[in-house]
Each structure stands twice: as structure tokens, then as C-alpha cells.
Image (cartoon, rainbow, N blue to C red):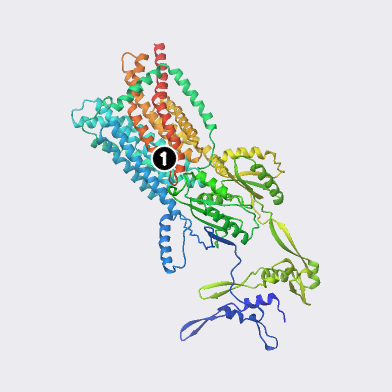
Amino acid sequence: MRSKITDVINAIKKSNQDTGGGIILENGFEKIIHAQGYTKGLKDLGEIVLKAPNRTPIKLTDIATINFTPKPRRSVANLNGTDEVVGGVVMVRYHADTYSILERIKQKIARLQEGDPDVQIVPVYDRSELIKKGVENLIHTLIEESITVLVIIAIFLLHFRSALVVIITLPLCVCLSFLLMHFFNIEASIMSLGGIAIAIGAMVDAAIVMVENAHKHLSHANIQNDEERQGAIIEGVKQVGPAIFFALMIIVVSFLPIFDLSGQEKRLFSPLAYTKTFAMLVGALLSISIVPILMLFFIKGKIVEESKNPINAFFIKIYGVCLTFVLRFKYVFLALSVLGLGGLYFVYKRLNWEFIPSINEGVVMYMPVTTNAVGIDTAKKYLEETNKRIKAIPEVKQVFGKAGRANSSSDSAALSMLETYIELKPKSEWPEKITYKQLRNKLEQALQLKGLVNSWTYPIRGRIDMLLTGIRTPLGIKLYGKDPYLLQDLAIQMEQKLKTLPESLSVFAEKSNNGYYLNVDLRQEKLAEYNITKESVLNMISYGVGGARVSTLIDGVESYPISVRLKDVERDNIESLDNLYIKTPFSYVPLREFARVYYENAPAVLKSEKGLSVHFIYIVPKNGVSSETYRQAAMKALESVKLPTGYYYEFSGESQYLDEAFATLKYIVPISIFIIFLLIVFALKNTINSLLCFFSLPFAFLGGLVFMNIIGLNLSIAVLVGFLALLGVASETAIVMIIYLEDAYQNFLKQSEQTSARLKEAIMHGAVQRVRPKLMTFFSILVSLIPIMYSHGVGSEIMHSIAAPMLGGMITSVVLTLFIIPTAYFVIRNAGLKKDFSAS
């Protein structure tokens, strides 16, 4: 007797269930009625009765083999190119402390390892090392910066007690900034500590200027007692204190554009913007509260006059000669300065744009692309071969790769998606002195395999790219249209064009239409002829061939899905399916009688965005080629590919991030600049002086752009952060210079003889007074940035991009403050003097 597969399915479902019967009352207590019908193991499952003709039961064991079998494999993992391994992923909750959790996991793994020594648990990607190295690198940089700043103060003032003001102020600023970080739940990371690192020089700037000005007042006054000493210090504070406060607030305001960013750029840079803002706010508040008190307490004893310090005397003499020469040819100098400012555009055009610099995470991620229809055996071979070749590279410590998806709802990877984590040895152990760029080229050459298109990224960066855009490479193209077949043809044409570009390392258009299908096309007229429904045939295909889930077997605390399936020989090829017998009311009929079974190529994956089908083209530019440079070259190359009406493409990845960031910045930057101008007006209380200060600031940018050209750095959001920080520092130094010049001018107006020559002397005197504080702030910021530029630890790439424009800009800021502002100020005041003389 033959049974239909639906008979088996129904029998299992009906014989594997529990139910309740309500309650009964007995002896005053309620008792719950529980009818137990669950099967409790394979033996129970085999005892299920299908039919009992002539009181002879036909059990499931009579017609089927019952055993535990694994699900069809959808993934494979390999370690170091040897045997297969089983891998696991730890997922941390959002906003959790990643480092502490990973440390506790390591402790747990150590205890598990003790329980079964035959099983080895090997970490293949440990993000705690990235965090640890990044934080250690920045703490080391912070200590170096602090020491160098203190040495500079002691050299220029020759007064150790005065240096104590900064010695106390600096750690106090840092500690209060950390306190604010804790209050606002900002974790200590590369970016958050980086904000404090680049703020150190500017953070103590207020204290430096105020201490220096107090020294100036003390050395010029005839101090007879402690009361006069305090009066001179207070007078020095009053002269520059308010302007310093507004200048530090300008630095705070200059970071407003960063807070208005969105997406990953906000997640990346907002910690830096917050900590930099905290540091500047704390510095501003301490400059008008704690610093004056510390000055009254520590600035005592013998004060060395500025001219008697050989270092100061040298710089004053050199500066006096240079400024005299500049004022003699003032119009020529200003004209050349304006021309130099015009050169900003040409210097800018030589630079390329990228979203953020590539961060060396210490682990390289290799993500080659292959055809969508690849099977488990082929994926396994690819994985073993690539891992063997990678492990053979002497700079590689360990390599772990996987193909397909993990048993997790968060992983939807297909078998065609290979992910390989390459852990590198410490650079001191590399046999050859090569760069990371050369190492990647070495890996690229070793992995030239037919059927694979190589793609390189880093674990964190790669995950961010895939989550935001679906593109697993640094750059990509999304091609939109209605017909997926036409989209693939167009994508292949674009792929061929892009491969010819010298900027391309690898280009791969998705071949999503290359899915292989075995279709069963039911014939309605034949089904009617045999008097069977589509459901009967579809159930046979779904359960008998596909092994769909029927019910669940509960075995203690474990549960297993129950599936009903035909033997392999009855379903493993097209001939078997053709001969698959279907029960009809008349007899058993092979499937070929009422269905057409055939192979077909069709899309393996269907993607849609913006209401249209979409095709991805993955692009990896060569090292040193920015996304903006590549986009310009690619757009020119793709002009020959004619797209039908309704079809279009757009760049994704870094290029998309840049466009989104620019769309935000073009509104918020002008607002921030206007607020900065208002703060300058509040600080100087004079419209002409405020305009002079404001329009002189672009000169500071010139040095930053030139320096970036010299070291070959691309423009990026990180560089923009550096320029915003430079804008604040340049504003501060310009404001203080104008204060000294204005003070000298007011003294000039009190003189009886008000000639152009006398005005020039007054301007010279005011400008020379600014030499020492300017050089102190310049060297403190400069020397605080140099350790950042020379650091090569984890996360140093972003910090280089932030520090570079500040470092170059500080150099031109010296020219701006010491020459351009005094010269322009003299021209403006001299013109007013001549006008007054003509009127009289």
C-alpha cells in the first residue's frame, strides 16, 4: 500500500501536539488538565500510525528512515588555509562599553578552554587591541605635548613660578574635560581623546597670553610692594582677558558645522567636536576665573625684562628689522599678500577630496567578489586557496576566512561573499621594511585567482560602508532602471570602460542574473484531466523535495525541526524530478505528465531602491587615488555608455558621503562664520578693527593648504576639522595683536605731535610687544602638533589629517599676525590721519 506525502505530514502534525482541558476542583484545590501528545524522541516519532487497514497499523518506521541530519550548509569557515573550523561572533549592545565587555569575554573563554582542552578557542578578530593601541598612542601624545608646552613657557619667560600657572591649568583643563565626557556619556576613544590632543596648545593659549602680559606690566612698572604687584597683574589681565575669552569662544563656535553633520561622519567626528568644545569652554572659563588667581599667587620674585632675555631680544631685533622693511614698502607688501591669497584657489585645486583617510585598524579585511551561483564546494576551495596564499606572506600572523552566512539574523551573506580577516604581525617583526601600501600590493599580486575580483578594506570601515550603502568597497556605482536584464548588460559595459582607467585597481559589476534555476511549470489542463489540485503537487515539491518544516520535536531543553523528504536518488537531478510520482484519484502518475521541468538562467538576487531595480558596480581605486579624483575620471570614461530613458547611475560609498556632508555644510558654515564675526566685534568693539581681523583670517588657510600639498595629503572631513580649529586659533592671535596695536594707537593720540612717522613708531612699538606672546603661542601649538604628525599608531591617520592644516596654517598665521595686520592697520590709521590733517 502506498501513502501520499500529505498523509505522512498530516499524521506527524496530528500526533505531535499538547492541549489543555481546563481545570477541575478536588478537595478544595484546582488541578489543571494537561493532555500530553508531544513526541519525546525519535522512537516516539517512529511509532506514529499512518493507517491501520484490517487492524494492522502502518507506522512511520515502516515507510521511512528517521534520524537526525544537519541542515543544508550555507557557510564554511577556514583558519590559516588548513582544516575547516567553526566560528562565532560576539555582538555588543548599542552604547555598551566595548573594551570592558571584550575583556570579560576573554576571561570567560579562558575558563571554557580549561573545561575541554581538546577544543581550541582562537580569537581571530579582537577589537579591544585596536581600542587599547589607539588610546595608548593618544595618551602618549598628550604627555609629550604637555611637557613641550611647559618647556617653551619656561624658556621665553625665564620664570619657573610663572610656568606653574600653566602646569596647574593644563591638567585641570584636561581633567574637567574628562569629567564633562563622563557626564555626557562620551567614551574614551581615538576621536574623543584626539579632540583634547589637538586642543592642548590652544587650551593653554589664554593662560600663556595672560601670564606674558602680566610679565610685561610688571617689568615696565616700578613695583614697590605686593599691592602694586597685584595691581599690575590685574591690569594686565584686564587688558587682554575679555578679548581672550571671546577668542576662545570663537574656537568653540568654529566647530558648530561638525555638530550639524549626519550619518557616519557625525558618529565619527562628533566625539572629537564635543571634547574639543569641552576643552575650549573649560579653558575660557578658567581664563577668567582660576588663571588670574593663580597668577596673583605664583607670579612673584624677580621678573626678567623682555629685552634682557637673549631669546626674546634676538626675535625682537629680527622682527623689528623685518617690520621696518615691510612698512617701508607697505603697499607692495599688501599687494603681494593679496596675490598670495589669490593663490589659495590654485593650491586648493591641486588637492583631491576623500571622505575620511583610510584608518589602519591593524587587521586587513579581504572581500573578493565572485559569481552569485557559486556552490558550497567551490566556495570552500576558494577560501582554502586564498587563506593559504595569504598565510604564506611573512608579515601575516593569522588569517581567518568565511564564506556564506552565520546562523544569525544579522548576517545575510550569500556563499559568493567571502570575508577574510588578516591579522598582521607587529611592524617590528616584519622581515622587510615595507609600508602598508606596499604590503597590500604584495597581497594583491599573491591573490590573482581566476573567478575572483579582489576587494580590500578594514573590518570597521567595511561594516560601516555595507550598512550605509550596501556597497562593500570604498567606492561604487548604483545603476537604476526597470529591466534587471538590461541593467546587467549596461553594468558590464560600464565595468569594461572603468577597467581601462589607470586609477582602477579592481572593478566588478554584479552578475545577479546568473542564477541557475530548475523550474517546475504546472499545466492547468493536465491537472484538471487527472483531477488533482496545484496544492497537491506543490506540497510534494515543498516537502518531498525541499524538506520544508512540518513540526517540531521537543527533546528535553532542545528542539529540532521535523521535515519530510524523499530519498536523494528521487530528487537530486532533473530526470528524478520528471519521474517523481504524484498520487491522483486514479493512480500514481509521474510529474512529467502534468508539468514541464526545465533549467533556466534568471536573476539570483533582485535589488531595488527608490522604486527601481538597481545594479551594483564595485570599485577599488588604486592606493593614493581619492574618490573624487576617481569619480571625475570615471564620469568622463562613462560618457560613451548610452543609457536608455529612465535609466541613470550615481556614485555611492565615499563619494555619496562627501555629497551628503557638503549638502549640510553649505548651510551651516556661513552661519558659523557670521557668528564668528559677531564675536570678533564683541571682542574688539570697533567695526574697522573687526573687519581687518575678519578678512585677514584666510591668510592662515594658505599655509595649511600648501603644507598639505607638500606632504601629499588629500582634503577630507578630517582636514576640514583641522581648518576649523585653525580658524579659531588664527582669530585669537589676530585679536590679541589688534588689541596691542589699538592700545599703542590710543597712546599715540595723546601725543602733541601726531605725524605719520610718529604713528609708525607707535605701531612698531605695539607690534613688537606682541612678538613674545605670539611666538610663545605659536611654538606651544606647533610643538604640541608635531608629536601627532610623527605618531604612527592605530588611528594616527585621522589625527594626521586634523593636525596637518593646523601645523601649516600656524606658520602663515605668524606672517599674518606679525606683518600683515600691523601693515594694514598702519595704512588704515595713516589714511585717517591724513584725512584729519587735510580737514584741519
| Residue found at the very far bottom of the displayed protein | 54
Q: Residue at x 49, y 26 (%)?
A: 341
Residue 240 image position (x, y, % from top left): 33, 30
Instruction: Residue 185: tell me if it is visible.
Output: no
Residue 299 image position (x, y, % from top left): 24, 34
Crowd class of label 1 (few under 14; some 14 to 19; many from 20; radius 10 Å): few
Up-down: is 475 above or below 546?
above
Say which residue label 1 marks.
790
Q: Depth check: give the residue in front, 512 or 587.
A: 512
Amino acid type, label 1:
Tyr
The total number of labels drawn is: 1
- Residue 266 is left or right of residue 686, and the answer is right
- Residue 78 is left or right of residue 164, and the answer is right
Kindly indicate the quadrant of the structure image that contains residue 72. bottom right
Up-down: is 353 above or below 581?
above
Q: Depth check: give the residue in front, 392 or 785.
A: 392
Which quadrant does the N terminus fall into?
Answer: bottom right
Up-down: is 765 above or below 465?
above
Up-down: is 365 above or below 665?
below
Helix, strand, or loop for circle 1?
helix
Kindly indicate the quadrant of the structure image that contains residue 521. bottom right
Instruction: Residue 346: tell me if it is visible.
Output: yes
Residue 425 image position (x, y, % from top left): 46, 51
Q: Depth check: give the residue in front, 425 or 704.
A: 425
